[in-house]
Every structure is written in C-alpha cells, then in structure tokens.
C-alpha cells in the first residue's frame, strides 16, 4: 500500500474513532438498518489498519534515528527533489498524470520524499563510492549523457505538388507561414500550432524530410519535399548544437547518483537493524510487538 494511501486511511480512522469507549453513532443506514461509527472503524482497521500502523512505526523509527544524528531535511531540499522528478517526466502535465494514476497528490509525494531524503542523509556516510567507480560509470554511460544536434521546424503538409507550389507562391508574396499552416496543412498534429513540430534529432523523421530540414538555415523555407505522407513545405526555426559533457562536468552529479543508489541498497538491512534495537509495542496487532534483541554474551 502506498504511503499516501496509508496516511489517508489513518486520518479517517483517527477522525472517526471515539476517544473513550464504544460509539453507537450512526454513520449510514440501509433500509432502516443502522451502520455505527464503531463498525466503520473496525472495518477500516481490518482493511488497512495493520499496514498503516506498521508504516507509522517505520516512519517514527526513521525520525528518531535522524534526531539522534542531528539530521534534518529542509523544505528547499524536498522541493528540489520534486523538481528533479518533474524534469524526469519531461513535463508537468506528464508528472501530474502519473500522480493521478497512483492516487497521490503533490503534498503526499512531498511527505514521502522527505522520508526518503532523511533515510538517504542517514545512510550516505555509510556508503563508499570511489573515484574509480565514478569514472567507470561515466565511461559506460557517456553516450547516454550526450545530447545530439537538434533542430526545430514547422511544416505545411498537402497532398499534391500543385498545392505545395501554390502555397510556395503565396509565401513568396509575403504570406505568413503559421497562418497558412493552420488553414491548409493536412497534418492534424501540428496545424493548430502553426505547423510547429518542436525540436527533433536525426532519425526522428522520415529521411527525405530530415535531410531537407537539417540542410536549411534558420528561418529559411524549403521547396516542396515529397515523402510517403505527401508534400511538405518546411521552415527551420531554431537549432541546438550537440552537447557532449566532459567527465569533469558530470563527476559530481554521477557521484551523487551512485551514493544515493548505494544508500538505497543499504536501507533494508539498516531498517532491520534499527527495528531489532527498538522496543515496539503494537496494540493493534500484539503479535507484532518487538523487544530489543539481547546483547550477545
């Protein structure tokens, strides 16, 4: 069960549980048969109470360890981590869609992230990432870290050469490319954006289109370019040079990533260790009560 879901279940349980004794307060009725608040509470406990409590116990253990080590996570650190997550999705829209799929909110993600950052801060001093490991990672992943040359272009797509020639004549007479694309292009995916295709690299488009687009200068318009889709009139609007970061530029980022990975690998054993040392009383599930392990003789 996701932490965010667990927190919701816990909140509901806390809100409905009477502070003293039983409660016969009615929360619903079906054909005159009453459902009491106590019955709802018991059902919620059965449905997720044990898992909810286990997660709260785990969180409390983590927070106690952090306090003992004088470790704190600032809101700015959480926000920076959230920004990186959003960036990894490519857009805020994709990020929000993923949150919705997991029934999470930004606030619940921030709570989860703060716990994860706390664990990372506790365990990072226990990691041992060498300069050689950082160099090896860079050597193995240098190509993936590079960004190839990209251009941005717009196009007008029509079915026939005659239509393309007529549009070229209109453009030569001062016609606005974006307006004509909106009015006459048959590419429904780009026409409403004035024909804009965004940035793309080599291999992203069909060969004839790619060759013509990359050969243009910025703001230059092509002739009629034939492809399997019809005839394109292409306007190059921007370009980005290839980026090949050096080891010096990436080494700190790589080390941070490797340290985080190693800390994550240590977390399961670490959690078992701190649970073994703790005195945990679980009144909801008594068999889960744990006492500290006796010291070895």
Image (spheres, rainbow, N blue to C red):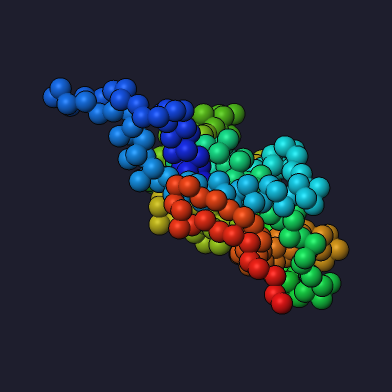
Say which of 259 and 278 sits in front. 278
Instruction: Provide residue 16's location: percent of width, then percent of height.
Output: 41, 28
292 left or right, relative to 39: right
Q: Tell me: 148 left or right of 290.
A: right
- Position above or below: 171 against 295: above
Residue appearing at x 47%, y 38% in the figure: 10
Residue 148 in view, yes or no? no
Give residue 143's position: percent from left, percent from top.
Answer: 69, 68
Quadrant of residue 268 within the rendered picture? bottom right
Q: Within the image, what quadrant is residue 34 found in?
A: top left
* Quadrant including the C terminus: bottom right
Residue positioned 57% across, 42% down in the render: 109
**Residue 197 sits in quarter:** top right
- In the displayed orientation, state which residue is furthest to the left: 31
Residue at 32% x, 40% y: name it. Answer: 43
Across and down, in percent, residue 25 comes to 32, 22
Foreground residue, 236 or 152?
Answer: 152
Q: Note whether residue 80 is visible.
A: yes
Residue at 43%, 35% in the rendered image: 13
Of 38 and 204, nearer the camera is: 38
Q: Position of residue 189 (x, y in %)?
A: 44, 41
Q: Is 50 above or below relative to 32?
A: below
Q: Is residue 63 left or right of residue 40?
A: right
Give the farthest residue toward the right: 248
As rendered, which of 158 and 72 lies closer to the eye?
72
């Amino acid at each position: 069960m996701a932490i965010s879901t667990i927190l919701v279940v816990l909140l509901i349980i806390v809100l409905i549980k009477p502070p003293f004794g039983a409660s016969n307060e009615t929360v619903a009725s079906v054909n005159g048969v009453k459902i009491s608040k106590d019955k709802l509470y018991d059902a919620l406990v059965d449905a997720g109470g044990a898992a909810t409590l286990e997660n709260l116990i785990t969180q409390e253990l983590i927070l106690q360890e952090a306090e003992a080590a004088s470790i704190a996570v600032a809101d700015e650190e959480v926000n920076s981590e959230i920004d990186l997550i959003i960036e990894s999705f490519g857009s805020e829209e994709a990020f929000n869609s993923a949150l919705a799929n997991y029934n999470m909110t930004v606030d619940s993600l921030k709570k989860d992230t703060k716990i994860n950052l706390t664990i990372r801060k506790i365990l990072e001093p226990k990691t041992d990432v060498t300069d050689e490991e950082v160099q090896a990672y860079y050597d193995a992943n240098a190509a993936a870290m590079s960004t190839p040359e990209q251009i941005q272009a717009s196009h007008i797509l029509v079915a026939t050469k005659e239509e393309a020639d007529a549009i070229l004549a209109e453009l030569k007479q001062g016609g606005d490319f974006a307006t004509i694309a909106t009015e006459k292009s048959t590419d429904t995916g780009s026409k409403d954006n004035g024909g804009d295709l965004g940035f793309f690299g080599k291999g992203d488009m069909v060969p004839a289109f790619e060759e013509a687009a990359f050969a243009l200068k910025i703001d230059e318009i092509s002739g009629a370019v034939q492809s399997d889709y019809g005839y394109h009139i292409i306007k190059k609007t921007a370009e980005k040079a290839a980026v090949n970061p050096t080891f010096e530029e990436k080494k700190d980022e790589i080390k941070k990533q490797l340290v985080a990975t190693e800390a994550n690998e240590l977390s399961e054993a670490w959690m078992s260790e701190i649970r073994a040392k703790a005195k945990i009383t679980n009144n909801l599930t008594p068999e889960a009560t744990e006492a500290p392990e006796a010291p070895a003789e």
